């Protein structure tokens, strides 16, 4: 791979405004990962599902930051789909059955604890990737 060139033959996904997405996903990976690490190490028994989902969200954010930054379009598309599904499923379940999530996850309430950025990010990511064909 040449520097700045995508690995799967498409246009660079981490160039231009895509750099902002890479940065935001990187920040969210760090924030969600640190939060999940503290929660899992100190309070795992209180809400194992919620804390595991937050750790999973952090892993998806990290994967997206790397995939977008390296121009791995197909991987980024798949990860955006997983992220959007996670936000929609967990967001809906956390509102319909709040007792299933006694503690909030990154995706609870469609990301309301993070100003709904977790809901907006995959939509922006999918839009950006669709424009990079």
Image (cartoon, rainbow, N blue to C red):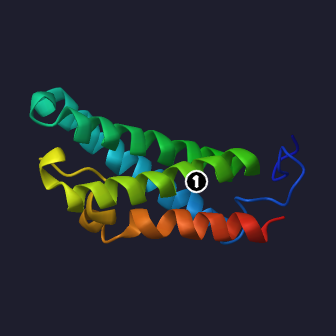
Can you see residue 71?
no
- Going 71% across and 70% down the picture, which residue do you hit? 16
Name the foreground residue: 41 vs 85. 85
Question: Which quadrant is home to the C terminus?
Answer: bottom right
Name the foreground residue: 34 vs 90. 90
Residue marked by disc 1: 81
Q: Relative to residue 8, is residue 68 drawn left or right? A: left
Question: Which quadrant is home to the N terminus?
Answer: top right
Residue 101: image location, x then y, percent: 18, 47
Q: Is residue 66 above or below residue 49?
A: below
Q: Relative to residue 86, is residue 110 drawn left or right? A: left
Can you see residue 116?
yes
Name the foreground residue: 100 vs 19. 100
Residue 77: image location, x then y, percent: 67, 53
- Going 20% across and 36% down the picture, which residue do you hit? 38
Residue 41: image location, x then y, percent: 18, 27
Callout 1: SS: helix
Q: Is residue 62 above or below residue 119?
A: above
């Amino acid at each position: 791979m040449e520097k700045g060139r995508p690995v799967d033959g498409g246009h660079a996904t981490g160039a231009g405004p895509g750099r902002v997405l890479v940065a935001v996903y990187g920040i969210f990976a760090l924030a969600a990962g640190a939060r999940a690490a503290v929660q899992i190490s100190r309070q795992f028994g209180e809400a194992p599902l919620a804390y595991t989902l937050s750790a999973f969200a952090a892993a998806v954010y990290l994967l997206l930051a790397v995939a977008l930054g390296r121009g791995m379009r197909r991987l980024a598309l798949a990860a955006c789909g997983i992220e959007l599904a996670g936000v929609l499923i967990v967001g809906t379940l956390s509102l319909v059955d709040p007792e299933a999530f006694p503690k909030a996850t990154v995706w609870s309430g469609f990301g309301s604890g993070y100003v709904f950025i977790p809901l907006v990010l995959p939509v922006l990511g999918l839009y950006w990737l669709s424009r990079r064909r």
